[in-house]
Image (cartoon, rainbow, N blue to C red):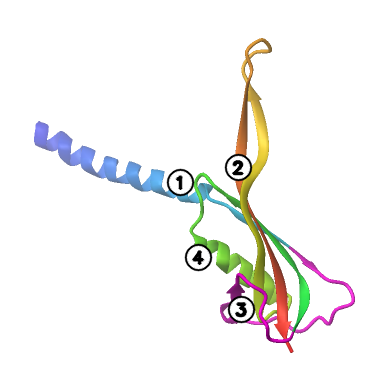
Amino acid sequence: MQAYSSRLLRPFMAATLLASALVLTACATVDAQTTAYVGVEHPAPTLANQVQVLREEPTRPHVRLGEILIDASVDPAPPITQVEQKLREQAATLGADAVVVVYDHIQPVATYVTGPLWSRDIETIEGRKLKGIAIRYQ
């Protein structure tokens, strides 16, 4: 009887482990908002895999096309490759050759209050904020 129940329990535990892993990865979010600058040329979109992610403004001549704001969860945090891919995709829609990250911080993004009026707890929710400037080389 013990061997029979352990054979039934093993697939159930594997399914539970898989489901919890999917739930945890599904909670990691990366949202983006893109703003094209007014009065700047609007080139055709580029390929996302060809867009560079830079931490410093290049010395090579370039024109600024717009801004990309990224909001990412912290707990659980998405892989950095997912955040960089979102930057590349958004910059590519503006026709950029590169995106320069000018702001990257974890900061409070929301608060919530729990408990009764006489004994409240205030909790903050943190999020990752990134700002990138999409550029096109001249």
Of the image marks 4 and 2, the number of the one nearer the N terminus: 4
Q: What numbered label is drawn on residue 51?
A: 3
Determine the CA span between mark 4 and mark 2.
20 Å
Of the image marks 2 and 3, the number of the one nearer the N terminus: 3
Q: Which residue is mark 1?
A: 24
Tag 3: residue type? Val
- The image shows residue 102 at horizontal and vertical percentages of 68, 64
Q: Secondary structure at mark 4?
A: helix
Of the image marks 1 and 4, the number of the one nearer the N terminus: 1
Determine the CA span between mark 3 and mark 1.
29 Å
Tag 4: residue type? Thr
Which numbered mark, 2 or 1, is in the foreground of this view?
Answer: 2
Q: Secondary structure at mark 2?
A: strand
Q: Is residue 127 above or below residue 33?
A: above
Q: Which residue is mark 4?
A: 81
Query: What residue is drawn where x is 56% and y is 66%?
Result: 84
Query: What residue is drawn where x is 61% and y is 72%?
Result: 88
Quadrant in which residue 19 is drawn: top left
Query: Which residues fall within the magenta stretch?
Result: 34-61
